[in-house]
Image: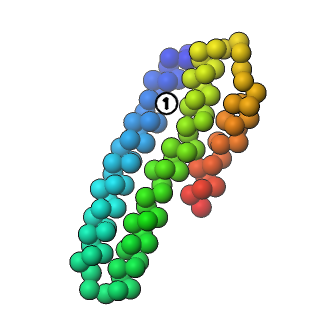
C-alpha cells in the first residue's frame, strides 16, 4: 500500500512539479523577451506583470505539497509515532494551493 502510494501519487506529483517549473521558466523568459522587443510601454508593463505572476505558480505548488509529502514520508518511516504538529501542518497546508493561486 505505501510503496504503491508513492509510485502512483507522490513520484508523479514531484515529477510534474519539476516539469512545471522548467516549463514556466521557459515561458517566462520568452515573455520577458517579447516585453523587451515591444515598442509600447503599456504592453511592456503588462508582459512584465504576466511574467512575474507566472513565476509564482510553481512555487505555490511546491509550498502547498512539501509539508504533506514530508508528513507522508515520516508516517511511512515511523508508523507508530505520529507527530501531532506535523499532522496539523499537513492538514493546514492542504488548502494552500487554492488559497494562494486565487
Residue farthest along the right direction in this orientation: 84
**Quadrant containing the N terminus in the rendered view:** top right
Q: Is residue 100 above or below residue 87?
A: below
Give me the residue at 53% from left, 23% from top. 5
Residue 65: percent from left, percent from top:
56, 39
Residue 68: percent from left, percent from top:
60, 34
| Side of 3 where 84 appears, left or right | right
Give me the residue at 76% from left, 27% from top. 84
Give me the residue at 59% from left, 15% from top. 77
What is the count of numbered marks?
A: 1
Q: Is residue 99 above or below residue 95?
A: below
Q: Viewer-proximal residue, 82 or 7?
A: 82
Residue 8: percent from left, percent from top:
47, 27
- To which quarter of the image does residue 39 belong? bottom left
| Side of 33 where 58 appears, left or right | right
Visual colour scheme: rainbow
Residue 14: percent from left, percent from top:
44, 36
Determine the secondary structure under disc 1: helix
| Side of 88 where 33 appears, left or right | left
- To which quarter of the image does residue 16 belong? top left
Mark 1, Cα crowd under 10 Å, few <14 / some 14-19 / many 20+, is some
Q: Is residue 2 above or below residue 87?
A: above
**Quadrant containing the C terminus in the rendered view:** bottom right
The residue carrying mark 1 is 10
Q: Is residue 30 above or below residue 59?
A: below
Amino acid at each position: 500500500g505505501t510503496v504503491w502510494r508513492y509510485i502512483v501519487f507522490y513520484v508523479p506529483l514531484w515529477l510534474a512539479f519539476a516539469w512545471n517549473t522548467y516549463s514556466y521558466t521557459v515561458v517566462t523568459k520568452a515573455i520577458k523577451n517579447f516585453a523587451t522587443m515591444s515598442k509600447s510601454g503599456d504592453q511592456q508593463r503588462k508582459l512584465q506583470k504576466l511574467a512575474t505572476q507566472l513565476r509564482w505558480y510553481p512555487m505555490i505548488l511546491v509550498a502547498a505539497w512539501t509539508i504533506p509529502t514530508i508528513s507522508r514520508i515520516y508516517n511511512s518511516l515511523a508508523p507508530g509515532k505520529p507527530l501531532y504538529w506535523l499532522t496539523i501542518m499537513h492538514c493546514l497546508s492542504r488548502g494552500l494551493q487554492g488559497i494562494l493561486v486565487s
